Image (spheres, grey):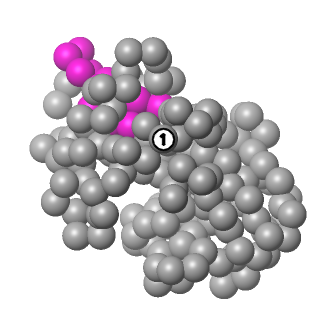
Amino acid sequence: MSAFTIRPERPGDAASIRALTQAAFRDMPFSDGDEADLVDRLRTSGDLALSLVAEDADRIVGHVALSPVTISDGSMHWLGLGPVSVWPELHGQRIGSALMKRAIADIREMGAMGIVLLGDPAYYARFGFEHDPRLAYPGPPPEYFQRLVLEGEPPSGTVSYSPAFG
């Protein structure tokens, strides 16, 4: 793969992000097939706190979205990360890792206290994410719900995502 750059989403990127997200999650066993619609709903509702794309000379090759979450203990300035999408034929090219690192750095600079996500613990541990039993997201197996504290103390409570998550 040739070099890629990471930049904030721009007007006109939505269709490419949608196609990428659909392809990235098409064959994933944990996918409900709603990820592309979710990104569209977050964008429409104004809940995309950060939307970054990776692009090479020809196209958008990766995307990451972050949106605000609420935590029942009243913790403020926490965000939910996801979905993260990379074209399937480009997996293993470090595009997802680069998007993750940039998203964490940008959110830290924006003053966020932390990030939560639902994902593979083996993958996300490399970025500092860990399961915390004091933080809950009902439904999926608890060990897949993880957090990264950027500033302050870890929160404790139940996390709620944007209504766009449905």
**Residue 105: image location, x then y, percent:** 62, 39
* Residue 159 sits in quarter: bottom right
Q: Is residue 67 magenta?
A: no
Is residue 44 toward the left or the right of residue 108 in the image?
Answer: left
Q: Which residues are magenta?
A: 52-63
Q: How many marks?
A: 1
Please say whether residue 143 is visible from this viewpoint: no
Residue at left 67%, top 48%?
68
Q: Main secondary structure of the magenta part?
A: strand
Please say whether residue 124 is visible from this viewpoint: yes
Residue at left 83%, top 54%?
76
Q: Nearer the viewer, residue 39 or 154?
A: 39
Q: Is residue 62 magenta?
A: yes
Neighbours of disc 1 within 10 Å: few (<14), some (14-19), many (20+)? some
Q: Nearer the viewer, residue 100 or 159?
A: 159
Q: Height in image: 83 above or below 116? A: above
**Residue 89: image location, x then y, percent:** 13, 44
- Residue annotated with mark 1: 41
* Residue 135 sits in quarter: bottom right
Residue at left 23%, top 15%?
57
Q: Height in image: 141 above or below 123? A: below
Helix, strand or loop at disc 1? helix
Is residue 28 toward the left or the right of residue 63 in the image?
Answer: left
**Residue 136: image location, x then y, percent:** 65, 78
The three-letter amino acid code for the residue at tag 1 is Arg
The residue most toward the left is 89
**Residue 129: image location, x then y, percent:** 57, 64
